[in-house]
Image (spheres, helix red, strand yellow):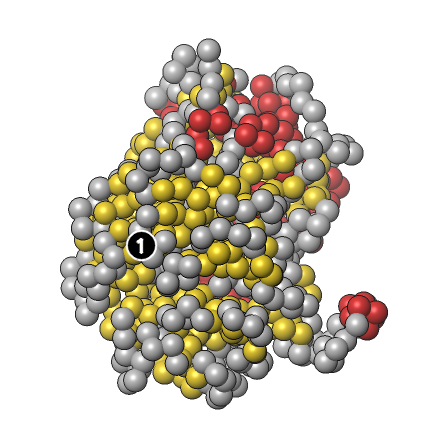
Amino acid sequence: MTRPIGIADLADLVVPSAPALSPDGTQVAYVARRHDLETDLTSTSIRITSTSGATATRALTHGTKDDAPAWSPDGTMLAFTRDGQLWLLPSAGGDAVQVTDLPLGAGVPVWSPDSTQIAFVAPVDAAAADGEDDAARARRATAPIVAETIGYQFDGLGFVRDVRMQLHVADVGDHTVRQVTRLAENVLSAAWSPDGQTLAFAAKAAGGSEFDYAAAVHLVPALGGEPRIVAFQHGYAGTVAFAGERLVVVGHAGQMRGHARLYAVDPHTGAATELAADLDRNVMPGAPAYPGALPAATGAGEVLFAVRDRGCTHLYAVPPAGGPSRLVLGRDGQVISGLSVTGSLAVTVCSTPTSFGEVALVDVTTGAATILTDHGTALAGREIVERVPREFAISDGSRVQGWLMRAAWANGATPLLLDIHGGPHNAWNGAADEVHLYHHELVAAGWTVLVLNPRGSDGYGEAFFDALHGGWGTADAQDFLEPIDQLVADGLVDPGKLAVTGYSYGGFMTCYLTATDKRFAAAVPGGIVSDLTSLAGTSDLAHLLSTLEVGAVPWSDRDALAAMSPYTFVDQVQTPTLVLHGADDVRCPIGQAQQWHYALRQRGVPTRLVLYPGASHIFPVAGLPSHRIDYGRRLIDWVTRHVAGTAPTVTHPQSSA
């Protein structure tokens, strides 16, 4: 007997990430993430499994905040982070040993080739005095924040004051830690040269404009010294790694607009060569809600990397000197994230239409994949409704890919929820995901759910990716409305029972559509942008959004911003609207939600504002379990009440409204 999976099943999900293949290719360590509803915490621990499949997975660590496993090149130790500090665990058995005790924690470990040192990036407070005690630190925390530059805040961190990410190295033998860089800018990533004498990293060039989103490739002696720029001085290097004697960089050779690309860089001359130039696809190094993998070299010298293809993330290989790329792993509905390589073997996490993710072993030569874990068994008896792909023709000649979720027993025209992705350069795909469990509950209640990849979405070529520049809302509205018209014409959807929701850019479009179209009976925008003029001076990425996405700043093109801003047309909104927003969101600041709710309230439109205390912009992906569950339940309650005219029985955790 099965039942549809639902929002509360978040508690039973175990999702793997960060797989690390041992140097001998026999074992995989990875992070297992689960959600404890009683403690309202998301816990991460490290598990281990054999690549032979002969043994079941077992717990390797028993902490609740263990992450980022990395094998030493000699295979004798596993480094990982626990509660934000660096730890070591002997692979032969024994207790884990803490290596660092830094005031603000340590980042992802990167082993030196000889297994004697570990490089990592860690936050450093330049204003802190040596030996500062807790009382002095607390006094500084309440001191006035004085900002001359625009980089004084960042989503998830709040006001960063004088804290910057710097490169460090820890000695494995005596656990001493030395700070290698002391820059005014943040260090983004680090890698060891094959001889262990040099560290490569990405950071903005000294003296660069705060209004340029740039990151150059630097080299610095591992023992310390003055860093020097070798490449991308006027571009953006997002990640840096060594593949043999050459550097591999994911980024942009110039302005950070359009696709990120893969480059090979000569560390001596700085000459950069684009790899995989035959692929008109965005290279994906991986980030929360943006699955991908850091590039890695195989034993044969090929470079493995991930790209977005029609919404999915797939694994490709390319010769180190350039040439035709080849697909290693990927098909419709398959999404890979994380990558670790030993010789001709690789491990990654693969999700599919019926799996939220399992660790897979991949033969790089043949592309054959073997699933090593079975975390999906925890959901036995729960039915995962698959997204069914469908393409829609738009009247201007464009084609938009989408997916429908609909119960097999559904007959005739049903209520519809249109769910709009964020970004705007993110993308839906056919794989199961843990963020949108509310889709399954609505389908079980007889709804149809529609998700679309309109222009601006990733995975359809750079021209499609960049087609939204300077045209938020004005360029893509028909990509949402015309597919709905087609579903109505097909008799699948009731035109009188339409609801729309979305998060981040999806929240923006939800507001824009309800301000410019009267068809929706309910709306639930989350993490919203409502006014592009006020966003230009308040978001932590305000200048990037203004120049590289929206294409205008308030004092140079007020009319363009007004045409794209939902707030310009808020007096036209009639749709009952539930606004959901993180109270500590500085990517799409809280004022964006407040002014939308205020205007609707003043005009008598049914509306409710729900703020989640302490929540940053990415809380639907990485926030408290109670917040994530509450988000989905409130959404279902609102659209059901205003579209179908009845309210389901819903229990809101910590409900205050």
Q: Is residue 646 above or below residue 81?
A: above
Foreground pick, 232 / 241: 241
Q: Secondary structure at mark 1?
A: loop
Q: Position of residue 32 (x, y in %)?
A: 50, 42
Toward the bottom, the furthest residue is 226
Q: Quadrant of residue 427?
A: top left
Image quadrant holding the C terminus, namely top right
Looking at the image, can residue 635 be seen? no
Q: Position of residue 191 (x, y in %)?
A: 41, 71
Foreground pick, 581 / 511: 581
Left or right: residue 633 versus residue 557 is right
Foreground pick, 163 / 498: 163
Foreground pick, 523 / 8: 8
Q: Position of residue 378 (x, y in %)?
A: 49, 27
Q: Position of residue 599 (x, y in %)?
A: 70, 45
Q: Quadrant of residue 356?
A: top left
Amino acid on which the number 1 mark rests in the picture:
Asp
Q: Is residue 194 above or below residue 466?
A: below
Left or right: residue 164 versus residue 336 is right
Q: Residue at x 68, y 38 (%)?
A: 40
Q: Residue at x 45, y 33 (%)?
A: 375
Q: Residue at x 32, y 43 (%)?
A: 51
Q: Quadrant of residue 312?
A: top left
- Tell me if mark 1 has few (under 14), some (14-19) or many (20+) residues whose alpha carbon lies within 10 angstroms of its own: few
Left or right: residue 19 versus residue 65 is left
Q: Is residue 410 above or below residue 297?
A: above
Looking at the image, can residue 184 be seen? yes
Q: Identify the residue position indicated by label 1 in the image.
A: 24
